[in-house]
Amino acid sequence: MYKKNPEMNFIEKFTYFFLKVLSISLQNISLSNQVTFSQNLASIFYHYIPKRKKLAKHNIKIAFPNKSEKWIDDTLCKTYQFFVFNFIQFLALPTSMDNIKIKIVGKQIMDNALKKNKGVILISAHFGSWEVLGHWLGINGYKLHGVAHEQNNKGSNEFFQYKRELSGIKHIYKKVGLENLYKVLTGKNILGLVSDQDAKSKGIFIKFFNKPASTPKGVGLFHLNTKAPMVYGLCIQTGFQKYKIEFIKVKPKKETIESITQDYTNILENYINEYPEQYFWFHNRWKTAPEQ
């Protein structure tokens, strides 16, 4: 059960209050107004707030070196539109889920993995509508424990935790320690790991769009130490108010951290090739270079 943190300063309390008021407001306006609001906001970010825009464009060029400048600019613009609308939809939870259609592919893969009673490692990425994926799992009775980074602003931190736990999922911060994360991997529990960001010197280097990318070792370590099955999960927007959740069995060629990490990264890359505007290009994915 979510409990609000009383140890917030004025700025953090204001942030929480602002997000709560915005959330309530968005839940009480029509879908068409939500769309208009998100389009206008995306346009403002794209044209007037350049933070990370240059980085995002650079990342798209790395992934798609043979695409034209126009294609790259169009994809970047669509990326802004996609993620701003998804954030608006997240703020409007749970009412924003009322009128969407979700197709589920591979549900049996997840259910069969859970039958082993070893817990399941659910791997995902900053791709598509990951909040819809988590919400769907929660309202359908899956015992998801999502691992997240704790934000510096306690107000936004508390709000996002509150929103995500509305569906019944659990929010776990990395700071709780590995021992507590390992405890999740029992019975019918699901440990959710978003594993597609730069892991600095602690990561393992695998190929992501044919370029070495430092990637967290967590998925591989959890699997090798517990033998918990691994499932990759994504939620793709296939049309207006239409989504597809897919569960894919992770089947590495070898039982090694490198092979496991490369296998699920290949899954992600295949989906990005099909839906490039649904990947969060704003992260410095190739920041850490391997030592020469």
Image (cartoon, grey):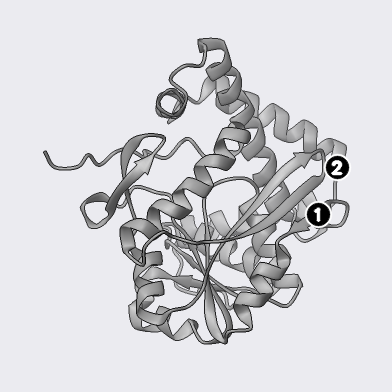
Q: Secondary structure at mark 1?
A: strand
Q: Residue at x 48, y 82 (%)?
A: 185
- Indicate the quadrant where residue 227 lies: bottom left
Q: Amino acid at mark 1?
A: Ile
Are dots 1 and 2 in contact, CB under 8 Å? Answer: no
Residue 27 in sight: yes
In the image, is 29 to the left or to the right of 287? Answer: right
Q: Nearer the viewer, residue 238 or 262?
A: 262
Q: Nearer the viewer, residue 266 or 191?
A: 266
Q: Residue at x 69, y 39 (%)?
A: 85
Which residue is labeled 1 in the image?
102
Quarter the N terminus occupies: bottom right
183 above or below 286?
Answer: below
Q: Residue at x 74, y 50 (%)?
A: 244
Residue 31, label in figure: 2
Distance from the alpha carbon under mark 1 to that under mark 2:
17 Å
Q: Amino acid at mark 2?
A: Leu
Q: Residue furthest front?
A: 253
The 10 Å Cα crowd at callout 2, few under 14, some 14 to 19, many 20 or more, is some
93 above or below 59?
Answer: below
